[in-house]
Image (tube, helix red, strand yellow):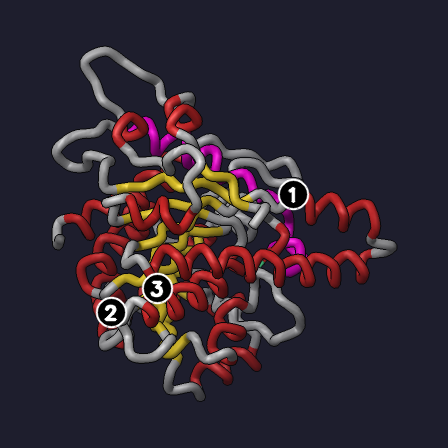
Amino acid sequence: MPYLHLFKKEDILSLVRIRRYETKLGERVQTVLSGAQFRDAIADSDADFVVLGIPEDIGVKANEGVGGTNTAWNAFLQSFLNIQSNDFLDGREILMAGYFDFSSLVDVIEINAFNYEEKIDAYRHAVNTIDDTVEQYIHEITQQKKIPIIIGGGHNNAYPCIKGAAKGWYKAGIIDLPQINVVNLDAHADYRAMEGRHSGNAFRYAEEDGYLEKYCILGLHENYISQNIWMDIVNNPFIDCITYEDIFLHEKRSFQQALAHAAAFTEGGLCGIELDVDAIENTLSSAGSPSGISPIHARQYLNFMAWNTRPAYLHICEAATRMEDGRQSNTTGKLLSYLVSDFVKAMLAQF
Ligand SMILES: N=CN[C@@H](CCC(=O)O)C(=O)O
């Protein structure tokens, strides 16, 4: 398994701005003991949450999008590890496991692909390697009854999260079939055709392969759903969707009512919690938008889902601090760290 880099305590501490009379989360989080195998490290840790980074934009490029989603992970780490450790969140409950480095795949593609079509094909092929790799680790974590928190990366990684969690929670005896439900707060359905793996079709592949049972999309933008996929969604009793326009423009239901509806739809099984940052207004991401939910809506969503579903995993994706077209943002990392800490606090309040 050459793609995963496990954190040592000193890796984490090197990112913490140590200050007298204060304790930061990075000084409290758990790391993998030196030389330990991943499986043993997870088993030996009493942390309830395992954080993994997938700093890649291969899936976005495979979807013909602009690269840059590989930049959010480091910014998240810098912010998250410098949160104050206090009565609200100590940090010991979290194992900072490590991150995947798939840059060798990119190098091979960029050197060898002959033209644009060949490049897209090669990127789609590379996503299969990411899928297989990520799935194994999510499987290991959930089999040990711990909740993976995955910071992407493109939304392609929903597929290995769903597949790995379905298999792992099943092996752990928590669910009767290797199948989970998912709620996804997203401007897009990511239910595109099975045309080769990319960031726009994770949920289609997960459903076709039998790992995704019920799927609820919250905040879908009417302008970015193709008619054929819309028909697939409305004709599928296992998929439900509340558009952004129905909540914020037509005011058919409030945001809170939409959250409650999504939680009720996915009731009865474990539920993967997905947040695509492109749903958040003016936030740098692969498909960022001037119209969308605000950061507090995203925080309310994660808090609500932590309280009102049985989370199988948390996956936050598509964020960036620097896009390949030159756009930059220095607030992405802090936003991601608010989101993760909100989810963890809400879960811990129930343990
Ligand atoms: N994960 C995002 N998927 C979107 C991207 C849209 C865009 O790049 O504008 C999709 O495939 O529809």
Magenta stretch contains residue 236: no
Disc 2 residue type (three-letter):
Ala
Residue that mark 1 sits on: 103
Disc 2 crowd rating (10 Å Cα; few below 14, some 14-19, many 20+) is many
Labels 3 & 1 near each other (Cβ < 8 A): no
State the residue lying farthest toward the top.
20
Do the CB atoms of the residues marked 1 and 2 lie less than 8 Å apart?
no
Q: Which mark is residue 272?
A: 3
Category of crowding for the residue at label 3, using alpha-carbon neighbours closer than 10 angstroms: few (below 14), some (14–19), many (at least 20): many
Q: Main secondary structure of the magenta part?
A: helix
Q: Position of residue 179 (x, y in %)?
A: 37, 76
Q: Nearer the viewer, mark 1 or mark 2?
A: 1
Q: Residue at x 43, y 84 (%)?
A: 234
Residue flagged by tag 1: what amino acid is it?
A: Ser
Q: Position of residue 1 (x, y in %)?
A: 56, 50
At 40% from the left and 57% from the top, the residue drawn is 140
